[in-house]
Amino acid sequence: MIADLNPDAASATAAEIEANGGIAIPCKVDVADEASVKALFAAVDAKFGGVDILINNAAHRSKAEFFEMSVEQWDQMQDVTLRGTFLCCREAITRMKAKGGGGSIVNISSVGALRPTLWGVNAHYDAAKAGVDSITRSLASEFAADGIRVNSILPGGMASEGGKNISATFKIRGPIVGAGRVPMGRMAAPIEVAQSVFFLASPAASYVTGQIIAADGGFTVS
């Protein structure tokens, strides 16, 4: 199930998966809205009979100087990033426990949870991602006995269209997570982060839970 606030984006992703032999259903969802999330998981139940893997990857694009940041901007970031993670985890874990057999949740966090990335415009984002890592650890501890694993991936700078546009769009008072700050000397290709997610979601990581793993080319140790 491909959930996105933008139905066209969800459909495009689903079409790409199906073109490569997979099965995917697009679904318009607002992860900050409880009723919308419940409807999503009801649709998953109807089509697939439950859920085994959840990837929380919803993102809210908003940058603002700290003293210019409105309460609305702060709340929107927390609603999508942190509340959305909570709501989706709650629905998924409810089903995983009822079905038995465990499950895997991978939350997409950010190196911003550990170190400032966009100085001066990203305090709300970094705070929300730190919250995602905290709930990751809490849920991993609480539901380990049920065989439910919960981990976070922290991507660094991405060689994606969004990543390329950041420095040109926003006023930055310090260095960003660019290739110059990464020991490996380059930004990540999206597939490199996706492979880390795949590992955590798969049986290959059956003894891994509660971990906060940076896929950042060494940025967090530089």
Image (spheres, rainbow, N blue to C red):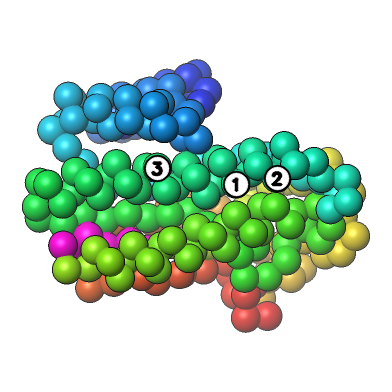
Q: How many marks?
A: 3
Please report the residue visible at 72 percent of the width from the left and 37 percent of the height from the top: 72
- Circles 3 and 1, Cβ within 8 Å, touching? The answer is no
Q: Nearer the viewer, residue 3 or 192?
A: 3
Q: Is residue 149 above or below residue 36?
A: below
Q: Nearer the viewer, residue 51 or 170?
A: 51
Q: What element does badge 2 sit on? A: helix
Q: What element does badge 3 sit on? A: helix
Q: Is residue 64 above or below residue 199?
A: above
Q: Which residue is mark 1?
A: 78
Residue 121 in the image, given as x and y percentages of width and height: 81, 52
- Cα separation, mark 3 vs mark 1, equals 12 Å
Q: Which amino acid type corresponds to the residue marked 2 in the rendered image?
A: Trp
First to last magenta residue range: 146-151
Residue 14 seen: no
Residue 91 in the image, given as x and y percentages of width and height: 29, 41
Q: Quadrant of residue 148?
A: bottom left
First-in-chain label (3 vs 2): 2
Q: Which residue is mark 3?
A: 87
- Image side of residue 38 versus residue 136, left or right: left
- Cα separation, mark 3 vs mark 2, equals 18 Å
- Circles 2 and 1, Cβ within 8 Å, touching? The answer is yes
Q: Which residue is mark 2?
A: 74
Q: Quadrant of residue 70?
A: top right
